[in-house]
Amino acid sequence: MNRSLNEIEATAKRATRGAGYSWGLAEEASKATRWLSRQGQDGVAALAALLDKGLAQPADHRPCAADEVWRNDGDLCPLATGAFLSDCAQGLRSGPVTMQRVAVPLFILPFAANAASELRCCVRVEMDGQVAMTDGGNLQCPDVLPELAERITVQTSETAPPWRPRGAQMCPDPDSWDRLAVLAHRTYAPATEESRLRGAGAGLSDND
Amino acid sequence: MTPAQPHIPRRDPAKMMRLSRLGSLHQCRLSFMRILMRRMAQENWQFSRPVFDIDRKGVGRAVYTAMGPERAYSLVAFAHDLPAEKRSDRVIADAWDTTFALFDGIPDESDIERLAENVPLQEAGRVSQRELSLSRANRSARLWTHVVDRLASGQQPDLQQIEAVGYLMRTTAVYGSGKFGAADRDVISDRAEMQPPFQAEMLSVYLTRTFVRDLVNHIAASRGGTQAVSLDPAIARGLGIGNSTGLGMAPFIVNHPILFNNWMMVREEAISRVRAVARAAPEDVKTFGQLVKQSILSVEHWRSEHPVQLDKLVRLKADLKTLAQHLSSWDATVECPWNTLIEWSERSLSEEGQELVASLILEPYGALVDGLAGCMADGNPDAFRIDGSMPVSAVRALLQECFGWALDLDWSDPANCARAWYVSEEKLEPRMGERFEEPIAAYEQPLAPARDAAAAFSALEAWDPADTVARFLLQHPEHRHTVRRAQMGRVAPYGEIRDNTISTSVMPVDMLRAKLSFFGATHFDPRSDRWVRICMYAGAPYPEELTPGNADLWVYPETAT
């Protein structure tokens, strides 16, 4: 079924929150999923795959800030890692960032795009030998990326590839969509008769 | 040589962003329906009704097309036979008297068939990227029956009954921006006529009002035959479209801080520009005085049963009396007369009265303020991006600036956090509940920025002030949404409500009114602390009457003189 980008963004936010992430990272996930969909990627499928990996608890899945190479004992979550990359965009001016064992590396790309917008340049992301490029508004990306990248290197690039824009992906994989809907459902409070009347605040007759 | 314009700063966000102030805002020249009406008149939009296929009982479909200089938009309307017991304004309703979609262009037969299968279902159906809005409206049972009966028997309706309600139908939801499959905002945001906020929704409601007038005439004619008369155009002109809005709209202004800032900042900028006018032309002073008289009439027509609004109306009526007295001896020839008037209002009137005066002084100065309409959309997606290089000390300073008042509040005191906002499983709509009486805290939505700011401020205290906020957020993702908002505050000084949105005394209708006032709504009638009825387009010229001469001040009812 066709989904508007607005629906994709809203569902991604609720699903990410339902999977146990903070609101701030859920916001990042929703914008990232929308950006990927806008670029013709199935961001919904990628997000569903990511959320099923259970990387929401940050301690083991975010980069240890002190390390030269971004890594941790567990696989890195691309939301926590990507958000840090975006936050540290200025650092890319002084050299590349290298990360180890990143789950669903497709999700690093929207954050690399943030960095590109911030730095007003192209950013090159190499994932186990495969290369993606973005200038913030465009993306050139291999057709298939691994579920886990052993090594990712992110750096600024002087040259831009010839962009070949793809139409937005607004027909996400239905099973992935359903999966996000199930996760989003965890954020909804069960209805009670009291909340029906009190929570929405009506209760007067409208037949007047 | 013209005298130098003095600089008069915009009013302080710390004052403007209090809930009681936001809950006292009035429409103005820069309200969205007035922006739309001005544009349509200036550009000489053409209106037509290519389809009106409604049976004698009032069931069928119609299409209304508005043709601008570059593009057309069409309201596709479906009229249904709704049993009285199913008539509910609540979002949990599943049937309505009428349902609508605003189509991007002119629909062909297959488009209309597709919409006929989906639009009557509303949330349970799907629309497409060709649709810009999805909405529905119910009859005001008391007024509808009266008007049909009268017209069918050859009489005009009773004016007192017309004034007591103000509209024949009220919309109970107008969905836009990608909801239920409709076109995303991006699809239309580059079009000049859709650039200001909510123009598609405002057009949909404007055409809905025309359809409702045509429908009531049609049903009366079907029933009364040759005996029936059409609704007197003067009476029709006074009828608006009602709207019934619940809590779902309140989180919008919290969730869109940049957008809401732009609305507030534009209005404040307009007010400061007019306050800085050094000399007022006599005709501008006269226009203002006339509109004050018309506003007195408008407020007389403003009905509410809610005790809080009743009290505010008593004070507003007293304010208008005080204002009229003041104007009778007001010397408008002094330097910056509008500024002296605003300063007087701040000393002499309630918040309702102050905000009415602030809106009214803009009216004579279209040339000075109307261009600001182009600054009300959110054209700054980059504001979402966090600047992680910012030092911890600077983030704390931003939090202090916006939420200084909240940092020392005892957020564990039940009175300060009695409420929690959540989304109900049933209709996926925002609701507000009692944190300590209902099992909702685990589902709480991030709609208490002040409380969250206090928590982030406290957590940041433990960090080296020179450290970057990127490193803080890596360890504390739970504060990420708060740091984002704090940084947005740099470009959005009016982006945050400077009040407690979860206290025991919060009135969500204040948030609803703030938003609806920017739509251009009038006659706010709270039905509870979280539910409000309003009127839209009352007094507006219908499409066949619209001219540049009447596109602007229709919102103020004509006085006898």
Image (cartoon, coloured by chain):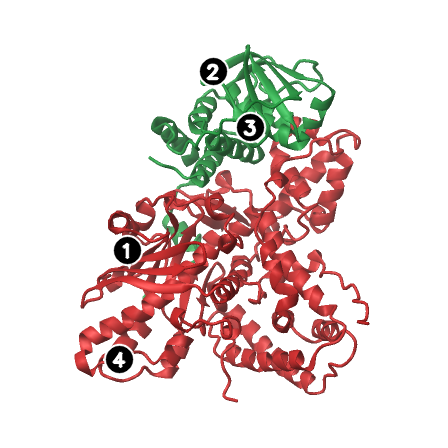
Identify the colour of chain B in the image: red
What residue would you read off at disc 1? B95
What residue would you read off at disc 4? B151
| Relative image position of residue B41 (x, y in whole percent) | 48, 67
What residue would you read off at disc 3? A110
Amino acid marked by disc 1: Ala
Give me the C-alpha separation between circle 3 and circle 2: 16 Å
Say which residue appears at 53% left-offset and 57% top-offset.
B508
Label 4 resides on the chain identified as B
Quadrant hosting residue B64: bottom left
Quadrant hosting residue B470: top right
| SS for callout 1 | loop
Give me the C-alpha separation between circle 1 and circle 4: 27 Å
**Chain in green on the image:** A
Amino acid marked by disc 3: Pro
Q: In the displayed structure, would residue B224 be above or below residue B453?
A: below
Q: Are marks 3 and 4 in contact (CB under 8 Å)?
A: no
Task: Tell me if I can see residue B292 in this picture.
Answer: yes
| Relative image position of residue A36 (x, y in whole percent) | 49, 29
